[in-house]
Amino acid sequence: RAKEEGRGRYRIFESSMDEAVQEKVALSPDLRNALADDQGLSVHYQPQIEILTGRVIGYEALIRWNHPVRGNIPPALFIPIAESSHLICDVGYWVLRQAAFQAKEWLDAGVPTPTIAVNVSAAQIWNSDLVSDVGKVLAESDLPPHLLCLELTESLLMDQNESRVRNVLKSLKEFGVTLALDDFGTGYSSLGYLTQLPFDKLKIDRIFIDGVNTSQRSTELLRGIIALGRGLGMTTIAEGAETQEEVAVLRELGCDQIQGFFFARPAPADEALAYALRMAADALVAATPDRYQA
Ligand code: C2E
Ligand code: MG
Ligand code: MG
Ligand code: MG
Protein backbone atom coordinates (compact mmCIF):
# COMPACT_ATOMS: atom_id res chain seq x y z
CA ARG A 1 0.00 0.00 0.00
CA ALA A 2 2.73 2.40 0.97
CA LYS A 3 4.45 1.55 -2.25
CA GLU A 4 1.36 2.34 -4.26
CA GLU A 5 0.89 5.63 -2.47
CA GLY A 6 4.51 6.41 -3.09
CA ARG A 7 4.11 5.73 -6.77
CA GLY A 8 1.00 7.87 -6.93
CA ARG A 9 2.79 10.71 -5.31
CA TYR A 10 5.65 10.34 -7.70
CA ARG A 11 3.27 10.64 -10.62
CA ILE A 12 1.73 13.79 -9.18
CA PHE A 13 5.18 15.22 -8.62
CA GLU A 14 6.14 14.36 -12.17
CA SER A 15 3.12 16.02 -13.74
CA SER A 16 3.56 19.14 -11.62
CA MET A 17 7.14 19.23 -12.84
CA ASP A 18 5.84 19.23 -16.38
CA GLU A 19 3.60 22.11 -15.51
CA ALA A 20 6.49 24.02 -14.02
CA VAL A 21 8.54 23.51 -17.15
CA GLN A 22 5.62 24.49 -19.36
CA GLU A 23 5.07 27.58 -17.29
CA LYS A 24 8.67 28.61 -17.76
CA VAL A 25 8.47 28.10 -21.46
CA ALA A 26 5.26 30.13 -21.59
CA LEU A 27 6.32 32.99 -19.34
CA SER A 28 9.71 33.91 -20.64
CA PRO A 29 8.50 35.37 -23.97
CA ASP A 30 5.87 37.32 -21.99
CA LEU A 31 8.60 38.70 -19.76
CA ARG A 32 10.66 39.59 -22.80
CA ASN A 33 7.67 41.50 -24.20
CA ALA A 34 7.05 43.23 -20.90
CA LEU A 35 10.63 44.50 -20.94
CA ALA A 36 10.46 45.52 -24.58
CA ASP A 37 7.17 47.47 -24.24
CA ASP A 38 7.83 48.69 -20.71
CA GLN A 39 4.43 47.24 -19.78
CA GLY A 40 3.32 45.51 -16.63
CA LEU A 41 6.62 45.82 -14.80
CA SER A 42 6.97 48.15 -11.84
CA VAL A 43 9.10 48.65 -8.79
CA HIS A 44 7.94 48.58 -5.20
CA TYR A 45 9.97 50.01 -2.34
CA GLN A 46 10.33 48.63 1.16
CA PRO A 47 11.64 50.92 3.91
CA GLN A 48 14.69 50.00 5.96
CA ILE A 49 14.63 51.26 9.53
CA GLU A 50 17.48 52.13 11.87
CA ILE A 51 16.59 50.29 15.06
CA LEU A 52 18.01 52.75 17.58
CA THR A 53 16.34 55.85 16.17
CA GLY A 54 13.36 54.39 14.32
CA ARG A 55 14.33 56.48 11.29
CA VAL A 56 13.85 55.25 7.74
CA ILE A 57 17.37 55.15 6.32
CA GLY A 58 16.64 53.70 2.89
CA TYR A 59 14.49 51.52 0.69
CA GLU A 60 14.93 48.26 -1.15
CA ALA A 61 13.69 48.27 -4.75
CA LEU A 62 11.72 45.09 -5.52
CA ILE A 63 10.39 44.30 -8.96
CA ARG A 64 6.71 43.54 -9.55
CA TRP A 65 5.12 42.02 -12.62
CA ASN A 66 1.46 42.39 -13.46
CA HIS A 67 0.94 39.86 -16.24
CA PRO A 68 -1.76 40.85 -18.79
CA VAL A 69 -3.61 37.55 -18.33
CA ARG A 70 -2.38 36.01 -15.11
CA GLY A 71 -2.21 39.09 -12.93
CA ASN A 72 0.52 39.59 -10.37
CA ILE A 73 3.31 37.05 -10.56
CA PRO A 74 5.67 37.02 -7.57
CA PRO A 75 9.40 37.54 -8.18
CA ALA A 76 10.11 34.21 -6.48
CA LEU A 77 8.42 32.69 -9.51
CA PHE A 78 9.60 34.79 -12.42
CA ILE A 79 13.13 35.78 -11.33
CA PRO A 80 14.29 32.15 -11.68
CA ILE A 81 12.66 32.11 -15.12
CA ALA A 82 14.53 35.28 -15.99
CA GLU A 83 17.73 33.69 -14.72
CA SER A 84 17.37 30.59 -16.86
CA SER A 85 16.26 32.41 -20.00
CA HIS A 86 19.02 35.04 -19.90
CA LEU A 87 16.58 37.89 -19.37
CA ILE A 88 17.87 38.60 -15.90
CA CYS A 89 20.51 41.09 -17.04
CA ASP A 90 17.86 43.18 -18.79
CA VAL A 91 15.54 42.89 -15.80
CA GLY A 92 18.32 43.94 -13.45
CA TYR A 93 19.28 46.90 -15.59
CA TRP A 94 15.65 48.01 -15.88
CA VAL A 95 15.17 47.97 -12.10
CA LEU A 96 18.49 49.72 -11.51
CA ARG A 97 17.45 52.59 -13.81
CA GLN A 98 13.99 52.94 -12.29
CA ALA A 99 15.35 52.90 -8.76
CA ALA A 100 18.16 55.36 -9.42
CA PHE A 101 15.81 57.91 -11.05
CA GLN A 102 13.32 57.44 -8.21
CA ALA A 103 15.98 58.01 -5.57
CA LYS A 104 17.18 61.15 -7.35
CA GLU A 105 13.61 62.44 -7.49
CA TRP A 106 13.28 61.88 -3.73
CA LEU A 107 16.63 63.52 -3.10
CA ASP A 108 15.57 66.60 -5.07
CA ALA A 109 12.28 66.69 -3.16
CA GLY A 110 14.18 66.86 0.12
CA VAL A 111 13.48 63.33 1.34
CA PRO A 112 16.02 62.51 4.06
CA THR A 113 18.41 59.64 3.19
CA PRO A 114 16.73 58.32 0.03
CA THR A 115 19.25 55.47 -0.12
CA ILE A 116 18.13 52.85 -2.56
CA ALA A 117 19.11 49.17 -2.52
CA VAL A 118 18.91 47.24 -5.79
CA ASN A 119 19.21 43.49 -6.22
CA VAL A 120 21.91 42.35 -8.59
CA SER A 121 21.99 38.84 -9.99
CA ALA A 122 25.30 37.00 -10.25
CA ALA A 123 24.56 36.71 -13.97
CA GLN A 124 24.97 40.48 -14.28
CA ILE A 125 28.59 40.04 -13.24
CA TRP A 126 29.21 37.11 -15.56
CA ASN A 127 27.13 37.98 -18.62
CA SER A 128 26.98 41.76 -18.74
CA ASP A 129 29.21 44.71 -18.03
CA LEU A 130 27.83 45.56 -14.62
CA VAL A 131 30.47 48.20 -13.93
CA SER A 132 29.74 50.18 -17.07
CA ASP A 133 25.97 49.75 -16.58
CA VAL A 134 26.15 51.12 -13.04
CA GLY A 135 28.38 53.97 -14.20
CA LYS A 136 25.95 54.84 -16.96
CA VAL A 137 22.91 54.83 -14.70
CA LEU A 138 24.67 56.96 -12.07
CA ALA A 139 25.69 59.46 -14.74
CA GLU A 140 22.26 59.64 -16.39
CA SER A 141 20.25 59.83 -13.18
CA ASP A 142 22.77 62.13 -11.50
CA LEU A 143 22.26 60.15 -8.28
CA PRO A 144 25.11 60.59 -5.78
CA PRO A 145 26.75 57.12 -5.73
CA HIS A 146 26.70 56.81 -1.94
CA LEU A 147 22.90 56.70 -2.17
CA LEU A 148 23.03 53.50 -4.21
CA CYS A 149 23.46 50.13 -2.51
CA LEU A 150 23.84 46.96 -4.58
CA GLU A 151 22.62 43.71 -3.02
CA LEU A 152 24.40 40.54 -4.07
CA THR A 153 24.01 36.98 -2.83
CA GLU A 154 26.62 34.36 -2.07
CA SER A 155 25.62 32.53 -5.23
CA LEU A 156 27.90 34.87 -7.14
CA LEU A 157 30.82 32.99 -5.64
CA MET A 158 29.79 29.52 -6.66
CA ASP A 159 32.30 27.67 -8.83
CA GLN A 160 33.33 30.83 -10.57
CA ASN A 161 36.47 32.74 -11.07
CA GLU A 162 36.84 34.65 -7.86
CA SER A 163 39.20 37.29 -9.19
CA ARG A 164 36.56 38.47 -11.65
CA VAL A 165 34.12 38.95 -8.78
CA ARG A 166 36.74 40.76 -6.74
CA ASN A 167 37.62 43.10 -9.61
CA VAL A 168 34.02 43.94 -10.38
CA LEU A 169 33.20 44.62 -6.72
CA LYS A 170 36.34 46.74 -6.38
CA SER A 171 35.39 48.85 -9.40
CA LEU A 172 31.87 49.30 -8.04
CA LYS A 173 33.29 50.45 -4.72
CA GLU A 174 35.43 52.97 -6.58
CA PHE A 175 32.27 54.66 -7.81
CA GLY A 176 31.35 55.14 -4.16
CA VAL A 177 28.33 52.83 -4.11
CA THR A 178 27.84 50.50 -1.14
CA LEU A 179 27.61 46.73 -1.32
CA ALA A 180 25.35 44.47 0.69
CA LEU A 181 25.52 40.71 1.03
CA ASP A 182 21.90 39.55 0.66
CA ASP A 183 20.28 36.46 2.20
CA PHE A 184 23.36 35.89 4.35
CA GLY A 185 23.60 32.40 5.77
CA THR A 186 21.59 30.62 3.09
CA GLY A 187 24.30 30.14 0.45
CA TYR A 188 26.87 27.45 0.07
CA SER A 189 30.09 29.40 0.17
CA SER A 190 32.76 29.16 2.81
CA LEU A 191 32.95 32.10 5.16
CA GLY A 192 36.46 32.91 3.96
CA TYR A 193 35.22 35.21 1.23
CA LEU A 194 33.89 37.64 3.83
CA THR A 195 37.40 38.91 4.48
CA GLN A 196 38.22 38.98 0.75
CA LEU A 197 35.30 40.93 -0.61
CA PRO A 198 34.44 44.55 0.18
CA PHE A 199 30.91 44.22 1.54
CA ASP A 200 29.65 47.12 3.65
CA LYS A 201 26.46 45.55 4.83
CA LEU A 202 25.28 42.12 5.93
CA LYS A 203 21.64 41.30 5.28
CA ILE A 204 20.71 38.51 7.65
CA ASP A 205 18.24 36.15 6.00
CA ARG A 206 14.72 35.85 7.30
CA ILE A 207 15.21 32.21 8.39
CA PHE A 208 17.42 33.46 11.25
CA ILE A 209 14.83 35.97 12.43
CA ASP A 210 11.78 33.77 12.33
CA GLY A 211 10.83 32.67 15.84
CA VAL A 212 13.96 34.09 17.38
CA ASN A 213 12.03 35.28 20.41
CA THR A 214 10.85 31.78 21.30
CA SER A 215 14.01 29.71 20.83
CA GLN A 216 17.18 30.21 22.85
CA ARG A 217 19.25 28.40 20.21
CA SER A 218 17.93 30.68 17.46
CA THR A 219 18.73 33.71 19.59
CA GLU A 220 22.31 32.54 20.11
CA LEU A 221 22.77 31.88 16.39
CA LEU A 222 21.48 35.34 15.57
CA ARG A 223 23.70 36.88 18.25
CA GLY A 224 26.69 35.18 16.62
CA ILE A 225 25.80 36.38 13.13
CA ILE A 226 25.36 39.97 14.30
CA ALA A 227 28.71 39.82 16.13
CA LEU A 228 30.36 38.42 13.01
CA GLY A 229 29.07 41.26 10.84
CA ARG A 230 29.94 43.89 13.39
CA GLY A 231 33.41 42.39 13.97
CA LEU A 232 34.12 42.66 10.26
CA GLY A 233 33.04 46.30 10.26
CA MET A 234 29.77 45.75 8.43
CA THR A 235 26.38 47.27 9.07
CA THR A 236 23.91 44.54 9.98
CA ILE A 237 20.34 44.50 8.73
CA ALA A 238 17.71 41.91 9.56
CA GLU A 239 15.34 40.86 6.78
CA GLY A 240 11.77 39.94 7.48
CA ALA A 241 11.03 40.97 11.04
CA GLU A 242 7.28 40.49 11.36
CA THR A 243 6.52 40.88 15.05
CA GLN A 244 7.16 43.28 17.88
CA GLU A 245 8.89 40.47 19.78
CA GLU A 246 11.34 39.80 16.95
CA VAL A 247 12.12 43.50 16.73
CA ALA A 248 12.76 43.61 20.49
CA VAL A 249 15.26 40.74 20.29
CA LEU A 250 17.02 42.34 17.32
CA ARG A 251 17.34 45.60 19.19
CA GLU A 252 18.70 43.85 22.25
CA LEU A 253 21.24 41.92 20.19
CA GLY A 254 22.52 45.16 18.66
CA CYS A 255 21.39 44.67 15.07
CA ASP A 256 21.67 48.03 13.28
CA GLN A 257 18.70 47.99 10.91
CA ILE A 258 15.49 46.16 10.13
CA GLN A 259 13.51 45.60 6.97
CA GLY A 260 10.30 43.72 7.55
CA PHE A 261 6.52 43.57 7.42
CA PHE A 262 6.35 44.66 11.07
CA PHE A 263 7.28 48.16 9.90
CA ALA A 264 6.19 48.22 6.29
CA ARG A 265 5.56 46.03 3.27
CA PRO A 266 6.98 46.84 -0.13
CA ALA A 267 4.73 49.46 -1.77
CA PRO A 268 4.64 51.81 -4.75
CA ALA A 269 7.03 54.77 -4.44
CA ASP A 270 4.43 57.30 -3.23
CA GLU A 271 3.14 55.03 -0.49
CA ALA A 272 6.62 54.09 0.66
CA LEU A 273 7.52 57.76 0.87
CA ALA A 274 4.33 58.68 2.75
CA TYR A 275 5.21 55.99 5.27
CA ALA A 276 8.74 57.36 5.70
CA LEU A 277 7.47 60.89 6.27
CA ARG A 278 4.98 59.66 8.87
CA MET A 279 7.76 57.78 10.67
CA ALA A 280 9.96 60.87 10.64
CA ALA A 281 7.14 62.95 12.09
CA ASP A 282 6.54 60.38 14.84
CA ALA A 283 10.25 60.26 15.65
CA LEU A 284 10.32 64.04 15.89
CA VAL A 285 7.39 64.06 18.27
CA ALA A 286 8.96 61.29 20.36
CA ALA A 287 12.21 63.26 20.54
CA THR A 288 10.54 66.51 21.51
CA PRO A 289 10.22 67.24 25.25
CA ASP A 290 6.59 67.36 26.42
CA ARG A 291 6.60 71.06 27.12
CA TYR A 292 7.07 71.81 23.40
CA GLN A 293 4.26 69.56 22.28
CA ALA A 294 0.90 70.97 21.43
P1 C2E B 1 15.29 39.70 -1.35
O1 C2E B 1 16.22 40.52 -2.16
O2 C2E B 1 15.86 38.98 -0.19
O3 C2E B 1 14.12 40.70 -0.91
C1 C2E B 1 13.43 40.62 0.29
C2 C2E B 1 12.15 39.85 0.15
O4 C2E B 1 11.61 39.60 1.42
C3 C2E B 1 11.06 40.60 -0.63
O5 C2E B 1 10.27 39.66 -1.35
C4 C2E B 1 10.24 41.20 0.51
O6 C2E B 1 8.90 41.50 0.15
C5 C2E B 1 10.29 40.07 1.49
N1 C2E B 1 10.04 40.51 2.86
C6 C2E B 1 10.42 41.66 3.45
N2 C2E B 1 10.02 41.70 4.74
C7 C2E B 1 9.35 40.55 4.97
C8 C2E B 1 8.67 40.02 6.13
O7 C2E B 1 8.62 40.60 7.20
N3 C2E B 1 8.12 38.77 5.97
C9 C2E B 1 8.15 38.10 4.80
N4 C2E B 1 7.55 36.91 4.73
N5 C2E B 1 8.79 38.57 3.69
C10 C2E B 1 9.37 39.79 3.79
P2 C2E B 1 9.89 39.82 -2.88
O8 C2E B 1 9.66 41.25 -3.23
O9 C2E B 1 8.80 38.83 -3.16
O10 C2E B 1 11.21 39.38 -3.62
C11 C2E B 1 11.70 38.06 -3.49
C12 C2E B 1 13.08 37.94 -4.07
O11 C2E B 1 13.06 38.15 -5.49
C13 C2E B 1 14.07 38.96 -3.54
O12 C2E B 1 14.55 38.59 -2.27
C14 C2E B 1 15.13 38.89 -4.62
O13 C2E B 1 15.95 37.76 -4.42
C15 C2E B 1 14.29 38.68 -5.87
N6 C2E B 1 14.11 39.98 -6.53
C16 C2E B 1 13.16 40.93 -6.35
N7 C2E B 1 13.37 42.00 -7.17
C17 C2E B 1 14.50 41.70 -7.86
C18 C2E B 1 15.27 42.40 -8.86
O14 C2E B 1 14.97 43.55 -9.26
N8 C2E B 1 16.38 41.75 -9.36
C19 C2E B 1 16.75 40.52 -8.92
N9 C2E B 1 17.86 39.95 -9.46
N10 C2E B 1 16.08 39.86 -7.98
C20 C2E B 1 14.97 40.43 -7.46
MG1 MG C 1 17.52 41.95 -1.67
MG1 MG D 1 17.24 38.95 1.03
MG1 MG E 1 15.58 36.48 -0.38
Image (spheres, rainbow, N blue to C red):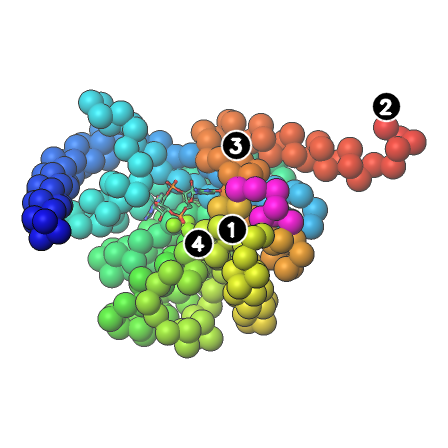
Identity, as a three-letter code, of the amino acid under mark 4 = Ile
* Residue 11 picture quarter: top left
Comes first in the chain, label 2 or label 1:
1
Residue 17 coordinates in the image, percent (x, y):
12, 45
Residue 107 coordinates in the image, percent (x, y):
56, 38
Mark 1, residue position: 211
Identity, as a three-letter code, of the amino acid under mark 1 = Gly
Give the mark count: 4
Mark 2, residue position: 294
Label pair 4/2, CB-CB below 8 angstroms? no
The reply, left or right, for residue 8 in relation to residue 57 is left
> Residue at point 32% right, 74% down?
163
Element type at marker 3?
helix
Question: What predominant SS class does the magenta segment belong to?
Answer: helix
Residue interval drawn in magenta: 242-248
| Cα distance in 3D space between marks 2 and 1 | 40 Å
Residue, far right: 291
